Image: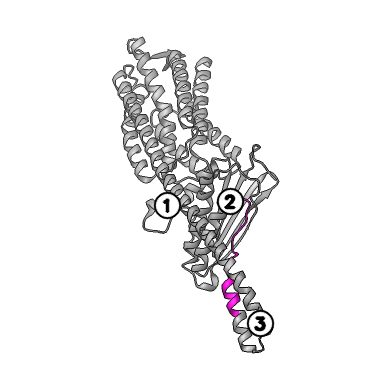
Amino acid sequence: MQLYKLLDLAVTMTEGLVLYVITLCFCRTPRFHRWISAAALPVIYMSTVIGITWFTDWGAERMFIMVALTVALIMAFYSVSICESLVTMEVFWMLLAFPESVATALASLAFNGEIMTVVEGIQILKWQLYVLTIVIRCLALGIAYLLLHDFHYRIRLKDAVVLTAGFLPGCGLGFAGTYGYLNLGMEDTFVLDLAASAFYLYFALQFLYSKNMSYLREQRQRDKIQIDCLERQFSWYQEKLRDEERVRGIYHDLKNHLLLLESGSDTEQTRRMAEKLRAQIEGYEDYVHSGNAFLDIILKDKAAKARERQIDFSVRADMEGIDFIEPLDISTIFGNAIDNALEACGKLPEEKRFITVRAGRVRDMLIITIENSAPAGKLSTEKTTKADSFIHGFGLPNIRNAVHRYDGQCDIKAENGVFTLRLLIPIQENSTIG
């Protein structure tokens, strides 16, 4: 009997390993320290499984308990939506149940339907079935990790509904098979196990299809951003050339005006000429020199928009030598964040509108902080308030995805009418720091 307890413990440990790997692939924002969330979740899960298996006489009904527990644990230890936690649970459960269904079907064929044995008066699954389940589960986990270790796509409600509809038939057939040999003492559940395996395989293919569609959707969004950035860059260079021409003209006029000021004696005329000079040069030198030419383009564009909307816009950015972040990711991070801030400030009275942008190196970290005023009671750290959620819903998720590509962290706080976005990105060793 001790052998079977050890085998059962080994199977439970593989369940914990699967949960650990899948949450690392899908859940990028832990509620606690990264390793606390990563380790505590599978430990609690395995402890619960062992307690239910060894100290209760529950049969297949425990499946429902474990499914609910998995969703609850994922949401407790990671900042994820219900859709994300549900799909994470389904992929995790598929990696548990599919190998078990395949192993049971193969064992049923090998032993002519007799997959149970009696040990110390207790009917239990044959030890070969435990071993086969462990082997198939480890192989499935290895394949899943290769496919999902770089998963960073947004799971939408539509994706979750479609995937859940594909998951439920396999889960139901798997429960029926498990109920058959655990609760009813049936040994030949080959048909149910085979059908469950087929539906789990269908779910896996459906998930891969959804993953590819998410990739294409994100790629289209990135292409759109890239085109917008290139157009903005071209427009900025054109504007700078025009400004330089205007500055040369102003310098020419300045000489003539100064001559008149030196020889003129009319005080009112002098005042008007001085006012005209100030009006001409105002706004010409509003360029931000952050050390990153691409960021300068974005900040110039956003500063102009803030000025048009009467928003107090201040920047202090030192990105000199920080060259490991791709221009498209710079656009995604700063462009989306400042656009969100401009939108929020536009809903406030003029005297309350402000946006501050800070970026620079602190030891081995790049710290980016963007603060803005926002209407009290309408602050959101997850979802857009716009009706067109498909377009505008990409803001914060895309910022998170861009930051996570560099192993960074995203901290969002909304309180007292101020929205704060703080990003911490480790400076990579191949970055040239001046």
Disc 3 designates what residue? 261
Q: How many marks?
A: 3
The disc, 3 or 2, on the residue closer to the chain's N-terminal end is 3
| The one of 53 and 88 positioned closer to us in this rendering | 88
Query: What secondary structure is marked by label 2?
Result: helix
* Quadrant of residue 251 within the rendered picture: bottom right
**Res 293 label:** 2
- Bounds of the magenta segment: 275-294
Closer to us: 27 or 246: 246
The alpha-carbon separation of the residues under discs 1 and 3 comes to: 57 Å
Q: Residues within 10 Å of mark 1 (few under 14, many from 20)?
A: some
Q: Position of residue 168 (x, y in %)?
A: 33, 34
| Among the 4 quarters of the image, the one containing residue 387 | bottom left
Q: Is residue 282 located in the magenta-colored stretch of the structure?
A: yes
**Element under label 1?**
loop
Residue for point 48% across, 45% down:
80
Q: Nearer the viewer, mark 1 or mark 3?
A: 3
Residue 131 forms part of the magenta stretch: no
Question: Which residue was labeled with disc 1?
Answer: 393
Task: Tell me which amino acid carries mark 3.
Answer: Leu
Give residue 347's mark. Answer: none
The x and y percentages for residue 240 are 54, 59
- Distance of label 3 from label 2 (alpha carbons): 39 Å
- Between circles 3 and 2, the one closer to the viewer is 3
